[in-house]
Amino acid sequence: MLTKRFNLLFDRLLRKTWTEEQINKYIGVFKRCYFTYATDTSLRERSASGGSVTAMLAYMLQNKMIGGAVVVRSVVQEGNKVRPEFFIAQTVEELKSAQGSKYSAVYFSSQAIPLIKDFGRPVAVVALPCDTRILRQAMRHDLALQQNVKLIITLFCGHNSEPELTDHVVKKLQPDDHPLVEYLYRIGHWRGQLQATYEGNQVVTKPFTYFSNYQNLFFFAQRKCHHCYDHTGYYGDISAGDIWSLRMKNEPIKHTAIITRSAVGDQLVAEMFEKGILTGQEASISEVCDGQARILPAHYNISARSKLNWLTKERIKDPVKEKVRLHDYIVAALNLFNERLSRTTRGRKIIFATPKPLIRLYLVFIKFLESF
């Protein structure tokens, strides 16, 4: 009870006032917002955030609105390598196999778009903000894509990681050289846990921070992520992501933040609420911003990264012309430095030799700066 009250109090103290200008920048065009979860418990078992996206796709499949859903699953390759793989799910069970977050580099243009073209039937697509933009651009020049892509669900994204980070975690967890069978980045309530299953049904579970502390520090980040300022997915029909407001930690079931952006997306979500397939309530856009309060301004402020081009040795364009304050420069510089450090053999040794409490302290310092 004390923890619940503390979370509510701390949540109120940290809550910001979001101006219309900030909402336009960070969220973009939208119709409605919801905090939701899948009513069907079986759709939440392996989900990272309420199972709402799986519920939407399952509803569309079962009602013949689409022939399949373009999603990503994690596959284990030789040498215990966990890699993401695009495929078109055509059953609810196949959808379940793709549940959960995938914090590893994907290549949408070369992997997903050919799948959609070859499938030749109506699909829904789940993609990251950068990949949604690529798909929208491709649809403008391809009538078949326009006709076959019926819905785009865009996932909130801070940045993506190169697979070497996952490889390191898998190796550290591995018991007695047993082959890896399955790897789940994040399951369970709130921050959740990562789970690795090895041959002989040996399951190793660790707090998600075992992986995310490195990931959140931009170690092994994809370089293209420095060029992105779209956190919530401006170009989707629906955007979906986590809610990190402390008051939501008190909820027994983790919710998904849903933003509807098009008439098609808005109608779908309203219909699913009406039929009881989604459970939850409409929320204000400010509540959605509160749930991503630290990362939204930092992600959007590509201006800070652009002014520090010399750290990346590549030009970062600045279309947003955002005001850059001292702490914005510090956060951008540290993230750029961390990514570069992880590209070298010596840098990787330094990163993984650093005691985990120091890694955590480093992350807390950056998150503290992002909170201003």
Image (spheres, helix red, strand yellow):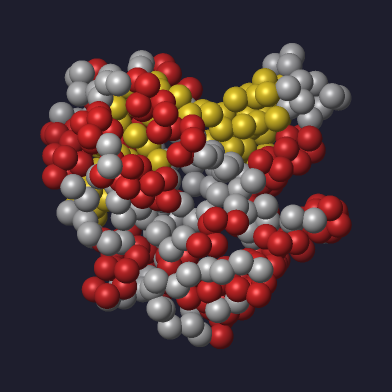
The front one of 76 and 308 is 308
Whether residue 17 is visible to the viewer of this picture, yes or no, is: yes
- Looking at the image, the residue that sits furthest to the front is 141
Please tell me whether residue 21 is drawn above or below residue 189 in the rendered image.
below
- Percent x, y of residue 109: 45, 39
User: Which residue occupies 32% across, 69% down?
Assistant: 25
Q: Please, is residue 100 above or below residue 346 in the view?
A: above
Answer with left or right where residue 22 lies relative to residue 250: left
Residue 321, position in %: x, y? Answer: 40, 78
Q: Is residue 68 left or right of residue 333?
A: left
**Residue at point 37%, 37% (across, down):** 126
Camera-nearest residue between 314 and 174: 314
Residue located at (14% from left, 45% from top): 263
Query: Which residue is at 38% across, 73% downward?
Result: 320
Towards the viewer: 134 or 128: 134
**Tag count:** 0
**Residue 308 image point, x, y percent:** 60, 76
Please state if 77 lies on the left or on the right of 7 as rendered.
right
